[in-house]
Amino acid sequence: MVDKRRYRDRAEYNKQAVAKRRRKLKLLAIEYLGGKCLACGYTRCAAAFDIHHRNPQKKEFGLSTKGLTRSWARIKNELEKCILLCANCHREIHVGFRNLPKHLH
């Protein structure tokens, strides 16, 4: 028997499956990068973490939600170029209000 299901028949399931995988990969990335903000030590909420590329010129792809669709091996390779920051510290660094300690560059 031929399967006649179409994407639209499973669209909501597929969206939920992708969202679940992205959440899982973000948690793995947070754990891989030490589980705390390297600027202030924040540890409370995974949604409050950002992944900051130390050198934007070496960035192959972003690790925002869309970047978390790649394989774990590729994500880990990109994480080697990054540090974990809370959203507040990340924003302060980008506007020049805060500087990263030299050993984190």
Image: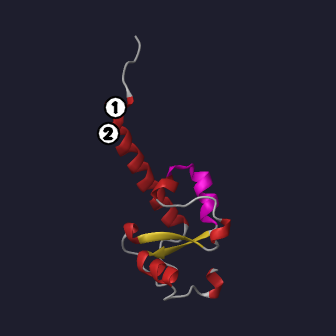
Give the answer, above or below, for where 99 lies relative to 2. below
Find disc 2 in the rendering and name its residue: 12
Query: Where is 63 relative to 87, above or below?
Result: above
Residue 25: x, y in percent?
Answer: 48, 55
- Does dot 2 land on a helix, a strand or a loop? helix
Give the residue displayed 37% in from the left and 43% down from the top: 15
Say whether marks 2 and 1 touch (CB < 8 Å).
no
Among the 4 quarters of the image, the one containing residue 81: bottom right
Q: Position of residue 104 (x, y in %)?
A: 62, 81
Front of the two marks 2 and 1: 1
Label 1 environment density (alpha carbons within 10 Å; few <14, some 14–19, many ≥20):
few
Q: Position of residue 57 (x, y in %)?
A: 67, 68
Tell me the element at label 1.
Answer: helix
Q: Nearer the viewer, residue 5 or 34?
A: 5
Look at the image and say whether residue 30 sits in the magenta stretch: no
User: Could you tell me which quadrant the C terminus lies in?
Assistant: bottom right
- For disc 2, the neighbor class at 10 Å (few under 14, some 14 to 19, many from 20) is few
Residue placed most toward the observer, 62 or 39: 62
Magenta residues, start to end: 69-80
Q: Position of residue 49 (x, y in %)?
A: 44, 70
For residue 8, the mark is 1
Question: The disc labelled 2 sits on which kind of residue?
Answer: Glu
